[in-house]
Image (tube, grey):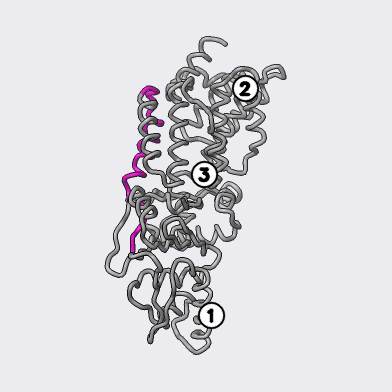
Amino acid sequence: MDSLITAAARALAAGDPLGALKRVALRDDAPALALRGIAMAQLGDLVRARALVRRAARAFGPREAVARARCVVAEAEIAFVSRDLGWGTKALDAARATLEAHGDRVNAAHARYLAVRRLLLIGRIDEAERSLADFDPAPFPPALRTAHELVVAGIALRRLRTKAASEAIARAERAAGEARIPALTAEVESARLILTTPAARLLTADEERLLRLEEVEALLASSAFVVDATRHVVRHKGTVVSLARRPVLFALARALGEAWPGEVTRDTLVARAFGSKLTDESHRARLRVEVGRLRRELRTLAGIGATKRGFALAPRRAREVVVLARPVEEEPAAVLAFLADGESWSTSALALALGTSQRTIQRGLDSLAAAGKAQSFGRGRARRWMTPPVPGFTTTLLLPAPLPID
């Protein structure tokens, strides 16, 4: 490899894309194309970056399997940053196997982290954790050690293990300091900010206050009876009753939890559960049926007693009932959570990450756009959506991953 290519590669490794382009901007050989593509990606021109990396992969000869595999990894990273979550993971796995077979452990590890970050983003936490099991980052350069610790911190945050997340972020800070790459340092700072910004709201009959992730973790580990509106479950100690597929029952449980130890009138319950402003006998009959179903669901945790005006929640063993709500109560809150990472998303990527239809995602985006909280650019299949992060809030509890139940 000639001196210009070597110098450009070193500039990219140090986070200096302009320095790399100065050396290879006018060259069209395969190594220069690959380095130009990576430089353009670091500068944010992802469309041109992807085209250059693909050209480089085609330009490398059949005997240059390692170089082609590196191009595949680079394209996968560009796809990830572009939030093209439908990009072929089989190609990335094959590239990683090629790199490992040829002794390029650094780029093979980078490919592994890309795959794990994708799994983490779409909520497949168990798979992400298994992929990192028994993987030692110590032999790798500081930048890869930083990436490793950020992934470990991300898994811990999604599982609401704030102590483990804080320790991983601290290790990432040390590794980023060694790497001396501003973008890495900024990413670590963003991860640290998640621990200190409000993540949820605590609601009771007497108060409403914001909670940090650490406080949410402590609440779920306490003896309180928790109606968890972030995951649509009801919790008490180690017992969790999921009402995620029973929205009417959860609406009733939340209304009863917010009013505890007081009662909730029948008219209020009808409005909260059925969305009806007027109450007639058919609504009251349906309410009795749904309250009966909720009693059966919560029979091990609480009873629901009828009062003269309505119903009241009666926990069997807990002395405190609280409602844990999202920091923002938007209808498309999960969509807002993904957009809050500052990246541009397509509707197909959002649908894949949330496990729903593109039409549902589009309706949510339209409502956010009407409220001035999202904006789009591009047309057709190239259309992307983005929004600035929600000021003052962390969106961890808006993302579609199960919180721990033990």
Which residue bears the numbered disc 2? 100
Distance between the Cα atoms at labels 2 and 1? 60 Å
Main SS, magenta residues: helix
Q: Amino acid at mark 2?
A: Glu
Q: Position of residue 76 (x, y in %)?
A: 58, 34
Residue at 59% from the left image edge and 56% from the top image edge: 358
Q: Are marks 1 and 3 in contact (CB under 8 Å)?
A: no
Distance between the Cα atoms at labels 1 and 3? 39 Å
Q: Position of residue 64 (x, y in %)?
A: 67, 18
Q: Amino acid at mark 3?
A: Leu
Labels 2 and 3: the sequence-earlier one: 2
Q: Secondary structure at mark 2?
A: helix
**Left or right: where does residue 365 sit relative to residue 85?**
left
Q: Quadrant location of the N terminus?
A: top right
Return the residue nearer the eye: 93 or 346.
93
Q: Position of residue 230 (x, y in %)?
A: 44, 58
Which residue bears the numbered disc 1? 289
Category of crowding for the residue at label 3, using alpha-carbon neighbours closer than 10 angstroms: few (below 14), some (14–19), many (at least 20): many
Q: Is residue 345 above or below residue 280?
A: above
Q: Secondary structure at mark 1?
A: helix
Q: Position of residue 133 (x, y in %)?
A: 54, 33
Residue at 32% from the left image edge and 54% from the top image edge: 211
Q: Amino acid at mark 1?
A: Val
Category of crowding for the residue at label 1, using alpha-carbon neighbours closer than 10 angstroms: few (below 14), some (14–19), many (at least 20): few
Which residue bears the numbered disc 3? 121
Q: Is residue 307 visible?
A: yes
Asked which quadrant contains residue 126, the reply is top right
